[in-house]
Image: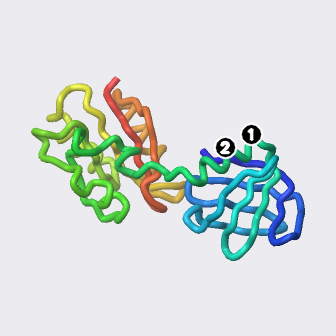
Amino acid sequence: MGLEAICACRVDGETAEAKALLESRELILRSPFRRNIAVTEIADVRVEGDELLLRAQGSEIALSLGAMAATKWAKKIVTPAPSLASKLGIGHASMAFVIGNVTDDALAEALDGHSAPIESAKLSVAVVRNTAELDEALVRHADLPKGSHIWVIHGKGPKAQFGDNAVRAHMRALGYRDSKSSAVSDTLSATRYSLG
């Protein structure tokens, strides 16, 4: 979840009250400035007094957040977001058994070098598009050691044909409980489940 404030905002010398949102990938300034700034475009981040100062999109920007909040925002901007592999808890010490067709670039990158046959995997990552694929993934996941997590990769948002609500209802009916979720990309989300 991001940070949010209604504060005095100065962009290139013009000052107005605006709503500022700091998400994991972007800084959003609402009316009157209307800017969406990728965190990767932000430079020269510093705190002076109560202000967060930065440079982005050719502009000098100042947000009057108060000293503590400005420091928190600055830290979030300059600290790299964890990788998707890290969010999913996969790596060389915790290899994933992959179930389903991985067509998403972000997911493929996260799994690159971190997938293994079922005999040496610590958890499953299942890409599913419907209930039948989810049931098949659970059958395959059952061959992992008892207590192993399964990450279900499913559609994201209210328009997804097989999204979070449908997956959760099905998994809970089977005795699985969700314990963590993560965005994968603009179209996919991941939810971690384990039995009981």
103 or 120: nearer the viewer: 120
Which amino acid type is marked by label 2?
A: Lys
Q: Residue furthest top?
A: 196
Quadrant of res 19: bottom right
Q: Residue at x 44, y 45 (%)?
A: 166
Which amino acid type is marked by label 1?
A: Met
Horizontal and vertical percent for residue 175?
34, 27
156 vs 22, left or right, is: left
Query: Eyeballing the image, is 43 above or below 134?
Result: below
Horizontal and vertical percent for residue 58?
69, 76
Image quadrant where one finds the N terminus: top right
Q: Residue furthest left?
A: 119
165 or 28: nearer the viewer: 28
Horizontal and vertical percent for residue 167?
40, 43
Query: Eyeballing the image, is 151 above or below 101?
Result: above
Q: Which residue is mark 2?
A: 72
Q: Residue at x 67, y 69 (%)?
A: 56
Classed neighbour count for the residue bearing mark 1: other residues with Cα under 10 Å, few (<14), some (14–19), many (≥20): few
Which disc, if any, is residue 193?
none
Q: How is the image coloured?
A: rainbow
70 vs 168, left or right, is: right
Q: Residue furthest bottom?
A: 58
Q: Residue at x 30, y 60 (%)?
A: 108
Q: Residue at x 44, y 37 (%)?
A: 180
Horizontal and vertical percent for residue 184?
42, 54
Q: Secondary structure at mark 2?
A: helix
163 vs 11, left or right, is: left
Q: Which residue is mark 1?
A: 68
Q: Secondary structure at mark 1?
A: helix
| Marks 2 and 1 in Cβ contact (< 8 Å) | yes
CA distance separating discs 2 and 1: 6 Å
192 or 29: nearer the viewer: 29
